[in-house]
Image: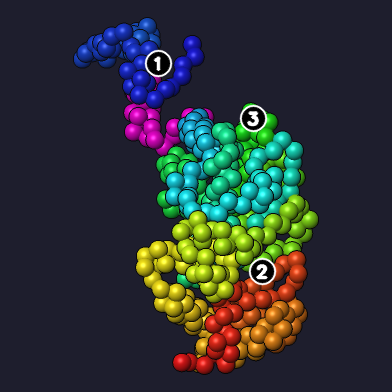
Amino acid sequence: MAFRLVANPAIRAYPFPLPRRLPRLQLCLSSRPYSESKYDEVWKNWKGWTKAVAAGSLALVGYVTYDLWITDQYKEYQRRLHESKRDSAIYKILEKGPSFSELAQDTLPRDAIVSEAKKFITPDKKPRGYSFVIGEHGTGKTNLIQLIVNSSKTPKGIIYMTIPNTDDVNTNHTIVINTMRKALGWSFDPVLDSRDTATTIFEILKVFSRVALKYRDVHQAIPVLIIDNANKLPELLLAQFQDFAKEASDSDIATVIFVSSGGRILHHMRERSAWSRVQRIFEIGDVSRDEALQYLRLQGIDDKIAAKIYDLVGGRMILLKSAARNIQDGAGINDLRRALLNEAKHQLRIAGMLPRGECYKQGKVVIGNLLKEGTISDDTYWAVVGDNKIGEKMLQKKVFSHHFYADNITFQSTLMKQYCELHSTISEE
């Protein structure tokens, strides 16, 4: 007869037969031995008791150590069950897409740009490489993305994450990983996750890939992962995301879109082999004079005041919006001018380009060349700076702007140029 031990019930279900009765030992004072049959009966009954005790001991040990010897098959079943639940939750978010409730209502319609960007930002049946949306801070990159996503029909097939701004040049790994987890709706699961070991970006991208493949097979469209503010990614994570973008493109898993302030990020990424899968570099610049004046009219700004605002800030949307709000709140044009020029000076101070600042010497030379020439080549910039660390820092401080296609350097904004023209020596007032 074959027997099998199982947890808990094994205490009650004995795997071996108990003896039918207790052995009866015959007391005798005489020297006469038991018969051979009596010896056999005693031996058989004690043998049964021995088996019963052994079985009970095994059952007790099994009950006490249940959590230690639970089968690998059951653990695997639990893991797959929780994994399936997580994948389903992420899949629903991928279908629903992000929602931007705080989308600016006073954005200037830019139908031509929106129509063009939609071609590579929304999911498509055909495989594509990864792309970039670049432009200086305040040109309207994020608003463009939000307009496209909000206008897309469900299922959208889009995951959107924006790297937080921090005081550091780059954001640390933990913040980036938590940002992507939040974008995917990834909550802590005690079966799948460990509180002692941090989740890696590779684990997150592996899960996203699995869900993206399911979405592709169901909807016959390759989903999109948008990484906004990508210029704030640490160098190592930027390289890892770029490698994933290439692999996802090669395997028809997903299309990755990098959204970045300034074109400097492209120089770092261009040096890697994954650059070969770049499909599109879409640059968003300032609006034209006519568009800026049209926007200000829509905000109820007088044409003469609108013209003065444009001369001060140019076509930078974020500054046009700020100026319009100040005028609507009763500020005069002269007060607005002083406030905006002071903001430019503050930006120079943050960049260390005012007297006694870390970058004052190099910044002064670059500013002098820009005031004289309007633009300088990338080679000229690095030659006059002479220090890679300082050169990189200045390009990330909203004073200068690098243009990828033209490969040259200009002032970051018309407002910054205005301030530097008024204070060409960058001396303290």
- Residue 348 vs 319, above or below: the answer is below
Looking at the image, which is closer to me, 226 or 406?
Answer: 406
Which badge, 1 or 2, comes first in the chain's sequence? Answer: 1
The amino acid on which the numbered mark 1 sits, given as a three-letter code, is: Phe
Is residue 130 rendered magenta in the image?
A: no
Q: What distance separates the C-alpha of mark 1 from that of mark 2?
A: 77 Å
N-terminal label among 1 and 3: 1
Badge number at residue 264: 2
Look at 67% across and 83% down and name the residue there.
370
Identify the residue position indicated by label 1 in the image. 16
Q: Name the residue under label 3.
A: 219
Q: Are marks 1 and 3 in contact (CB under 8 Å)?
A: no
Residue plotted at (55% across, 54% down): 108
Q: Could one spot residue 168 in this view of the protein?
A: yes
Coordinates of residue 292 in the picture (x, y in percent): 57, 62
Instruction: Give the magenta range.
Output: 50-75
Instruction: Give residue 384's quadrant in the image.
Output: bottom right
Tell me which amino acid carries mark 2: Arg
Report x, y in % for residue 16.
40, 15
For discs 1 and 2, the disc positioned in front in the rendered view:
2
Residue 152, position as x, y percentages in the image: 58, 38
Nearest the eye: 95 or 306: 306
**Residue 207 picture quarter:** top right
